[in-house]
Amino acid sequence: MVGVYRMHQAGAPEVMQWEEEDIEAPTGKMVLIRHTAIGLNYIDTYHRSGLYPLPLPTRLGVEGAGVVEAVGDAVEHLQVGDRVAYAGGLGAYAEANVMPEDRLVKLPESVSDEVVAASLLKGLTTCYLVTRTFPVSADDTILVHAAAGGVGLILCQWARHIGATVIGTVGNQAKAALAEANGADHTILYQTEDVVARVKDITDGKGVNVSYDAVGKSTFQTSLDSLAPLGMFVSYGNASGNAPAVEPHDLQNRGSLFFTRPTLATYAADPKDLQDMATQLFGVIAEGVVAIHINQRYPLSELVQAHTDLEARATTGSTVIIP
Ligand SMILES: NC(=O)c1ccc[n+]([C@@H]2O[C@H](COP(=O)([O-])OP(=O)(O)OC[C@H]3O[C@@H](n4cnc5c(N)ncnc54)[C@H](OP(=O)(O)O)[C@@H]3O)[C@@H](O)[C@H]2O)c1
């Protein structure tokens, strides 16, 4: 038997209930992983609240690290005892989970299980955002919303390492200090400052080359108004609710803007891309280019509190759940 969180209806954090169940022995290309650390990601709240509807009942959680406990008879590259992790799929909020071999990344000795659980999904996302969606260069000035959040801190560090000028928006002064210590050249307190005016001031009226916006509804207009001609609006999340529809004429009138709504699921769909991006991520972590900040840890039994805190904007950096 293993302990798992399951929800029978969408809603507030309390819909996640602890249950015991038999876990299937892996067959074919499936692998049984005993978790040592579990990631907390904003998408988990979309699944739980019903913003991203799932067939019910369902298990939750998309990111886990741990040790291979059993393998199906068609598994080729993994064996019992290997350290692995995944960022995608469902069922991570549990003591153990079964995943396909081609969704698993083998872990190098240079990273701990906790660091991986804190960074695989957020770091792979950052990797594709700054190298593929909009390949950031040293000539670019970029806007990062929620700069002190999980993805935000990794994104600020990675872009700064490339040489870009990084402007981050944050909810309070402590988050501003954290973002500035992790690559943000400028921070804007969006609760009290005019974000667009500050962006225009910092960029001598030009605007930014890209806005990385995962806040969604409440920052949509700010992102649009902050872009330079030929700039790219990367709408990659909806922490404040879904962004409104995009008006093509508006993109035209503002100077041939680009708009994209990317997902890690697309960029990591090919297992080779998943492995390549993981190698890049573990490389920047090992080199010290990107530090992973685990600023909250919760036992698995306190998952409801972890969701409550994430949605209340009470967390910074990454959060790890310990089974
Ligand atoms: N498309 C993809 O491939 C992909 C992959 C991973 C993550 N994401 C997205 O990236 C975003 C960040 O994920 P994360 O796990 O690292 O979370 P996070 O950034 O640590 O937490 C969300 C942050 O958003 C800010 N925020 C602004 N308005 C908010 C509101 N109304 N409600 C809640 N938070 C609000 C808060 O920071 P302030 O207080 O500073 O405003 C909050 O701390 C999420 O939107 C997630 O969906 C997308």
Image (spheres, rainbow, N blue to C red):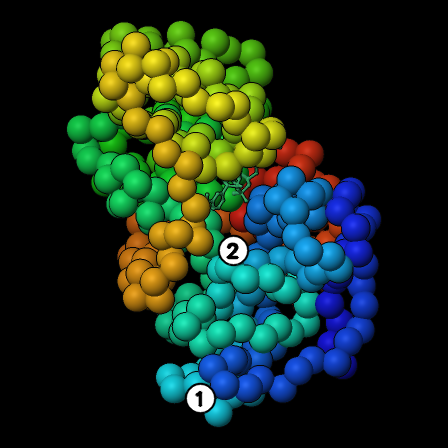
Q: Amino acid at mark 2?
A: Ala
Q: What is the residue that sits farthest to the bottom in this orientation?
A: 73
The answer, for residue 100, to whether it is visible in the render is yes
Q: In terms of depth relative to the viewer, which is nearer, 154 or 247?
A: 247
Identify the secondary structure beneath mark 1.
loop
**Dividing the image into 4 quarters, which one contains the C terminus?**
bottom right
Ligand 1 shown in quarter: top right
Say which quarter of the image contains residue 272. Answer: bottom left
Cα separation between marks 2 and 1: 30 Å
Q: In the rendered image, is residue 119 in sight? A: no
Q: Which residue is mark 2?
A: 118
The kind of residue tagged 1 is: Ala
Among the two numbered marks 2 and 1 on one chain, the one whose residue lies closer to the N terminus: 1
Position of the N terminus by quadrant: bottom right
Left or right of 10 in this view: 61: left
Q: On the rendered structure, is 190 left or right of 76?
A: right
Q: Position of residue 294 (x, y in %)?
A: 54, 51
Q: Position of residue 84 (x, y in %)?
A: 47, 73
Which residue, given by chain and number where applicable, does mark 1 sit on? 74
Q: Nearer the viewer, mark 2 or mark 1?
A: 1
> What residue is shown at x 54% (from left), y 48% (from top)?
318
* Local secondary structure at mark 2: helix
Residue closest to the eye, 248 or 93: 248
Work out whether 206 lies above or below 273. above
The reply to whether the residue tagged 1 has its Cβ within 8 angstroms of ligand 1 is: no
Where 82 sits versus 269, above or below? Answer: below
Frontmost residue, 186 versus 45: 45
Place of residue 132 in the rendered image (x, y in percent of width and height, measured from the top left): 27, 45
Q: Horizontal and vertical percent for residue 300?
A: 72, 61
Q: Give the residue at x 37% y 72%.
A: 108
